[in-house]
Amino acid sequence: MKTSSNFHFQVGEFKLIALSDGAFPVSKDFFFANTPQDMIEHIPDQFHAPLNFLLIDTGKQKILIDAGFGEEHLPTGGHLLRQLQQEGIKAEDIQTIVITHGHLDHIGGLSRNGNPVFSNAEHLITAEEWNYWSERPETMESRTLAPLKDHITFVQSGCHICPGISVNHTPGHTEGHLTVSIESQGTRLLAASDILNDPVTLSHPASYIAAELDPEKGMETRQSFLQQAYTQSAQIFACHYPFPGLGKVKKSEGQWTWMPLEN
Ligand SMILES: [Zn+2]
């Protein structure tokens, strides 16, 4: 079911909404590092990459996975709060936020003028990710995360947020990157965050977003994430895939292909 620009769906008994935060301008070299040119020759040198984020309503709590760019950082992004409002959800209604990693397109919306935007939320992050940015106070990411310090809870791989929803440490893109596993009534969704960049490169897992900290580790993580999704017949949610960023992967002759959810 589609209402406005948000995409509603269910994973078992959980209600989910894919929200578009907008799109951000990227260069082809940045978004498709280490990628064979013939795979991406149809893509312009500059383009806008989608920004998709996920709200989960378990019936008991509302969980947001990342919070987008934030209005002040990007004219073509930062729409997430408005999209939530369209659903009748206010920032104060969010109880839990998973910070998959500290890049600005995922955390820019978490604080404003030195205050947390989601004032009632517990913010979950790995210690690795928090420490990485804390040690780099000159970065916009660090300045954006700092006001959250009293609202942060460190999580480790395998931690459950509630029955059926857990986080996994998936390093490579950043040191403390998290993916989220959502399982209810035999249906599973894996939220990839930035493990994946674009469906056209799925058959070439050595391709990565140039912001990736450790591309070799990133490729290992990407392969095992895709294998897990395939083995579990899980849906995947990817932040920078075409909206709503939902689909499954297929494997043939050792190569992955993307099967977007038909809606
Ligand atoms: Zn990203």
Image (tube, helix red, strand yellow):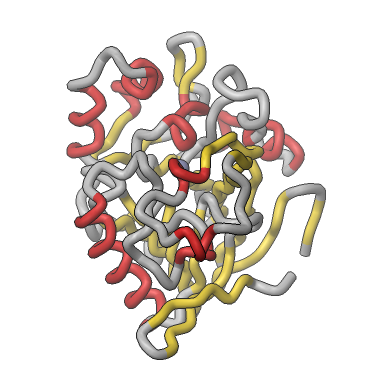
Residue lying at the far right in this picture: please name it.
Answer: 4
x then y, percent, for residue 43: 61, 53
x then y, percent, for residue 120: 47, 29
Vertical side of 103 occupied by 148: above or below: above
The image quadrant that residue 213 belongs to is top left
Whether residue 224 is visible to the viewer of this picture, yes or no, is yes
Whether residue 161 is visible to the viewer of this picture, yes or no, is no
- Horizontal arrangement in the rendering, residue 19 relative to residue 197 (left or right): right
- Horizontal arrangement in the rendering, residue 83 relative to residue 69 (left or right): right
Quarter of the figure with the C terminus? bottom right
Quarter of the figure with the N terminus? bottom right
x then y, percent, for residue 59: 56, 56
The image quadrant that residue 102 belongs to is top left
Give the quarter the ligand 1 occupies. top left
Vertical side of 109 occupied by 94: above or below: below
Vertical side of 261 occupied by 62: above or below: above
x then y, percent, for residue 86: 76, 39
> Could you tell me which residue is drawn at 57 percent across and 58 percent down?
41
> Could you tell me which residue is drawn at 40 percent across and 66 percent down?
164
Q: Considering depth in this image, is 58 or 39 the residue closer to the camera? A: 39
> Could you tell me which residue is drawn at 55 percent across and 69 percent down?
11
Q: Considering depth in this image, is 148 or 256 the residue closer to the camera? A: 256
Vertical side of 132 occupied by 47: above or below: below
